[in-house]
Image: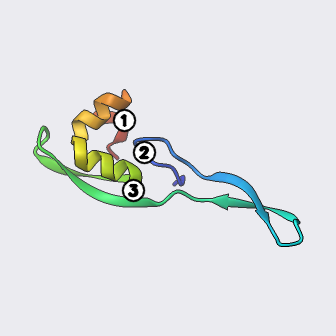
Amino acid sequence: MARKCSLTGVGPMSGNRVSHSHRKTRMRQLPNLQTKRIYVPELGRTIRVKLSTRALRTVTKKGFVKFLHDQGLRLKDVVR
């Protein structure tokens, strides 16, 4: 499975690792992904979602269905 947040779409970034002598080598920065079970009261059950910790903070603050609505997603798009 891809290293991508299923809610926000955040994926790996690439850049250069720069040494003291200023040599550059390519590197990847992976997002901090967590697999979480989130209870959805509208469904009356929990769902398993792979999301970034930034998205997890926002889901905790707003609520899962409100967050999906703001992102323009449906519940069907993110449920495995």
Tally of numbered tags? 3
Q: Position of residue 43 (x, y in %)?
A: 14, 40
| Disc 1: which residue | 77
Residue at disc 1, secondary structure = helix
Q: Specify the amino acid type for callout 2.
A: Ser
Determine whether, in the image, residue 57 is placed left or right of residue 19.
Answer: left
Give yes or no for contact between labels 1 and 3 (Cβ–Cβ under 8 Å). no
Helix or strand or loop: what does disc 3 sit on?
A: helix
Q: Amino acid at mark 3?
A: Thr
Q: Earlier in the sequence, mark 3 or mark 2?
A: 2
Left or right of 69? Residue 32 is right
Please tell me the numbered disc located at residue 6. Answer: 2
Residue drawn at the location 28% of the way across and 46% of the way down: 59
Nearest the viewer among 18 and 44 is 18
Tell me which corner region of the image, top left, top right, bottom left or bottom right, holds residue 29.
bottom right
Measure how far apart labels 1 and 3 are at the Cα level.
19 Å
Q: Quadrant of residue 40?
A: top left
Q: Quadrant of residue 76?
A: top left
Q: Please state if 31 lies on the left or on the right of 27 as rendered.
A: left
> At label 1, which amino acid type do we have?
Asp
Mark with earlier residue (1, 3) = 3
